[in-house]
Amino acid sequence: MTDSSAVSITAVSKSFGRGSAAVRVLEDVSVEIGQREFFTLLGPSGCGKTTLLRLIAGFETADQGRIAIEGQDVTQAPPFRRPVNTVFQNYALFPHLTVEQNVGFALVEQQMPAAQIRARVGESLEMVRMQSYARRRPAELSGGQQQRVALARALAPRPKVLLLDEPLSALDLKLRKEMQIELKLLQAEAGITFLFVTHDQEEALTLSDRVAVMQGGRILQMGAPREIYETPTHRFVADFIGDINLIEAEALPGNTIRLIGGAQITHPHQAHGRVTLAIRPERARIVALDASHLQARVVHTAYLGTALVHKLALADGSTFLLRQSDLDGAQPSLGSQIGLSLPADSLRVLVQ
Amino acid sequence: MNIRHFPMTREISLLVLVYLYVPVVVLVGYSFNANRTATVWSHASLDWYARILANPSIQSAAKNSLVLALCAATAATVIALLAALATARAFPSRDGVEAVLKMPLILPEIVVAVATLMLFVALGVQLGLGAMILAHTAFCIPFAYLPIRARIEGLNQGYGEAAQDLYANRFRSFRRVTLPLLWPGIMAGFTLAFVTSLDDFLTSFFLSGPGTTTLPVYIFSSIKAGITPEINAISTVMLVISVLLVSLSFFLGRLRR
């Protein structure tokens, strides 16, 4: 643990239920989140990401481990004594209060003088461009507007860390894309650490400085989006983030890997026997049959505007996706047999 | 299947409405009758209203009824609110506790009234307004409890967490968020309890001491002396108060939402 960490989570475990019905939701999780970092917890539902967020907010208490915010131990502190604020998935705006009363709620609790509250509420609403809605009630606002107010309310007390629990999941796609950009700008403007929870891998990659991919109560891999995308260490991570082809192969001594059909690739590895190779659809190349690592038949081609995605069938019957960005080049016809080259530097040998 | 498509739905509905409200309409109508005999119409007059306003025993009975209803409804609402907050959370004997809370709704009132009378006499509690407030509070609790409980049920759990996240401790979060959001339910519960107490005859009849008659008890004893349009007038006033209160709480509840 270092003093420069905004959030420091050390060996935290959490179970729900008692006795034999107990379910372990977090298993020995440790994370250090840096100052002003946009950090994302990414994983499918039930992976423990929301529980971890709720532990940091103080709505749940850890069974084991330690949680510190800016070096201060808050493991046992109630939510109202923690310098963090949350943007809830359903926003949880108080329906009986106006927008400005909602945004000023925490400031009143902090016993800020009225004039200062007014100024801070104004600033916060301006940040999310909602000044003209100050006197409205939440029920009179659209989903996107409620989202902005929830952000303003959580940012108004200037927390050390802003916790965001799938805040964009209730918005339609177009609005979600807009809000993603705004969130990023807002974070830069506010200079606050953002801890973001999502199951949307694209959202995670777009927004984050660092991503932690969670599954079954553990963090499988942590790193910059590019690192997670290009060098996944687990089969689950590779599969969960973006499209990827997973090919069964055999690892031979001398850094050689033998593919289906017998072709061999030189690739450094420590494995032995059966392994899984991962390659992104945009990394494989169409080559002449006699120069290929793999042979495949074109089953289906989808036009995506900026690229073509070919669905291919390999010799063993498994499916291989190939993304072709060069729309002017030669396009394989449906049903034809094509050759694939797998550049060694785009291949990953995965542990199961 | 749509119930509106049954034959005769309109006719049957009208009949039921007539059946329910004709007595009340007749009673209200004759309260404006100038004739001394309650069932013979001569001409319209506000005479009887002037008379009940001037009658000191009616004034005192009305005051007793209002004080009793106000005290009993307030006490019952406070207890019901606490009970509803407690039963909103799951605990092993919750169903049992809820059943006990709702019990007065199904207990025969005559039994409870007699039992209360015997208990109070045994304990040496003096009969009168105080005793009536105690007894009314008890049977008003479920009337106050049900609307508050329903309101809590419909309330998003997340509001309390949001308040605590924004630095409000448990008490502040209750005062600034939970209580205002429950307010329509509390109003509805209070009104129901108030109207129930105002209308009660049996318990009051058993527990009223000398000089502490309530309006229903007064009406009952005057009927024994013969029906006059005065009774129609008092009953109409009670009816108007009840309807006004319930409508008021209904509209306040709508405004809050």
Image (tube, helix red, strand yellow):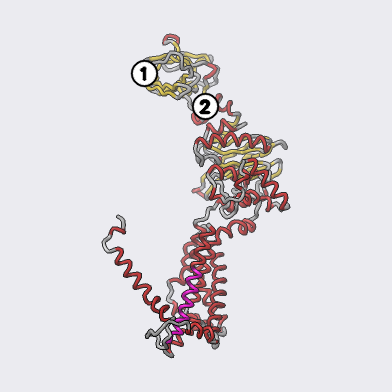
The picture places residue A295, in percent across and down from the top left corner, at: 41, 15
The picture places residue B154, in percent across and down from the top left corner, at: 49, 56
Residue B8: image tag = none
Which residue appears farthest toward the left when viewing the image? Answer: B7
Q: Secondary structure at mark 2?
A: loop
| Disc 2 to disc 1, C-alpha distance | 34 Å
The picture places residue A285, in percent across and down from the top left corner, at: 47, 15
Viewer-proximal residue among A303 and B6: B6
**Amino acid tagged 1:** Leu
Which residue shows up at 57% across the image and 83% down it? Answer: B125
Point out the stretch of residues depicted in magenta.
B227-246
- Choose top left, top right, bottom left or bottom right for residue B225: bottom left
Between marks 2 and 1 in the image, the one whose residue lies nearer the viewer: 1
Viewer-proximal residue among A218 and A125: A125
| One can see residue B45 in this view | yes
- Choose top left, top right, bottom left or bottom right for residue A1: top right
**Amino acid tagged 2:** Val
Viewer-proximal residue among B145 and A66: B145
- The answer to whether residue A212 is left or right of residue A333 is right
Give the chain letter at badge 1.
A
Viewer-proximal residue among B4 and A187: B4
Identify whether A258 is placed above or below A97.
above
Q: Secondary structure at mark 1?
A: loop
Give the chain letter at badge 2.
A
Residue pointed to by mark 1: A334
Residue pointed to by mark 2: A351
Identify whether A209 is placed above or below A132.
above
- Same chain for marks 2 and 1? yes
Label 2 neighbour load within 10 Å: few <14, some 14-19, many 20+: few
Q: Quadrant of the N terminus of chain B?
A: bottom left
Is residue A17 inside the magenta stretch? no
Identify whether A296 is placed above or below A10.
above
